[in-house]
Amino acid sequence: MPKTPHYDAPSVMDQGSIWILVAAPSIWAAHFLVSYWVAAVYCAKSTTGALGGLMEPRWIAVWLGLACIAVIAWLGVIAVRRYGGVFVIFEEITESSERGRDKFIGHVALLLCVLSVVAIVFTIIPGLVFNEC
Amino acid sequence: MLSGCDGRHNWMAGAGEESAQVKTLFIVLMIGAGVIWSAVVGAAIYAHKRGAHPNLEREARQFVIWGGAVLPTVLVGALLVWGLIILRDITADDGDLTVRVDGERWWWRVIYETPEGDVITANEIRLPIGQRALFRLTADDVIHSFWVPALGGKMDMIPGRETTLTLTPQTLGSWGGLCAEFCGGAHALMRFDAIVMEPEAFDTWLAEQAEPAKLSADNPGFEVFQAEGCGACHTIRGTDAQGPVGPDLTHLASRDKLGAGMWDMTPTNMARWITDTHEMKPDIDMPPYPHLNGARLDTLVDFLMRLE
Ligand SMILES: [Cu+2]
């Protein structure tokens, strides 16, 4: 039995809302942008030119990245708990029901969470390898 | 025509530590790609031959998840780290010697940093074997790109910025260098030789390059040079000619090639360079001198060919 009746608009991150789908990729995009901006501003302001240090901005990208991954993990938990998302769907979802939709949304959201975490890790790696701008 | 195919410009020649690293990465990638491709195609053929097996669905899906998602993510991550480490190494900021190269349309200003001061030359780069040379690259007008494929990586030269690149040559010889970023009319004629020498021979060469030109002030060829206004653009150290626009000509004749790595350094090519400049190299900032001929031209060419 669906908790939310049809005529009630779903609240932001509640069952039935599709916001959970865009949340994780948006966090990834935001982390990418902020990391890029911070590094660019640091390098532009660095007095040592091209050989200026990336030592400080790299930690901003790392800690921000870990925070983002934590939030995405929490979204993943929501996708599993509230939406009943699973990694692999074995039976086809054919019914046009709240339950079927939720399960599908949960499944996609979960996969997007995994993708976003991988992407954030890949964004952080170059910052850890390079010491210079 | 396909200069990429002869040895001088071959990036697989492995004549430098940096190009050898890139070559290893390339070979590992190719072999890895071959293995993965064979495995995927093999699995597809096997699956096709065997037909559907509904009771193995779970295993099949696990196989797809591990083989199709987890493994590629891990492999791509590992390759990313490896590639980044190579990039970091070849753009490092230290070397046994430092060379500043400034990309101009369409030639190269080359400055060796030595304890005694800067040694300025152009259009030819000589390097001691086994030593790591740090290149600090800039551009004067538009974006150029500095590349000696046989020795190592390629790096853009950006106006208003300095980029770095290291080359550690491992094989003696004259390797081809070129501009790898389209920069206008004579872009394809913007080349240079990178000559790898024994360290002692390199030291002698560098000491010679540091010297001013050896010529007497009343040299008739130099008089033509000055009368024609060449000295407004070109520098010959030790003389009044101090023009900053074109390549330093102090030791012009010591270079293997004329016109930024293009033609053999011969009197015939030199005479043609002066009278038919734009036929040889279109669009360049140097004006042609078609009125120069006969004895005057010969004297000038003779003078230039003695700038060793
Ligand atoms: Cu160029």
Image (cartoon, coloured by chain):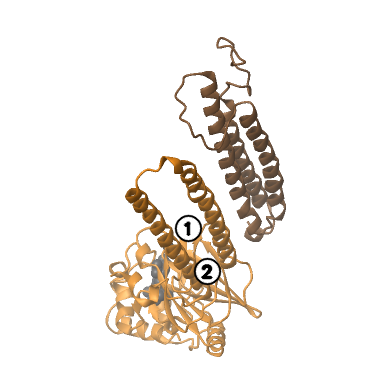
Chain colours: A brown, B orange
- Where does residue A28 sit, x and y in percent of width and height? 60, 39
Q: What amino acid type is highlighted by mark number 2?
A: Val
Identify which residue is drawn at 53% across, 89% down. B201
- Where does residue A31 sit, x and y in percent of width and height? 63, 41
Q: Is residue B10 left or right of residue A49?
A: left
Please, which chain is the residue tagged with disc 1 on?
A: B
Identify which residue is drawn at 66% across, 33% down. A77
The image shows residue A56, relative to residue B288, as above or below, that is: above
- Where does residue B242 sit, x and y in percent of width and height? 51, 73
Q: First in sequence: mark 2 or mark 1?
A: 2
> Visible in this render: residue B227?
no
The image shows residue A9, relative to residue B180, as above or below, that is: above
**C-alpha gap between disc 2 and disc 1:** 13 Å
Q: Which mark is residue A91?
A: none
Please, which chain is the residue tagged with disc 2 on?
A: B
The quarter holding residue A67 reads: top right
Q: Which residue is mark 1?
A: B141
Q: What amino acid type is highlighted by mark number 1?
A: Asp
Which sits in the foreground, A41 or B90?
Answer: B90
Q: Which residue is mark 2?
A: B101
Identify which residue is drawn at 40% across, 57% down. B37
Q: Is residue B13 left or right of residue A15?
A: left
Which sits in the foreground, A72 or B111?
Answer: A72
- Where does residue B139 sit, x and y in percent of width and height? 51, 61
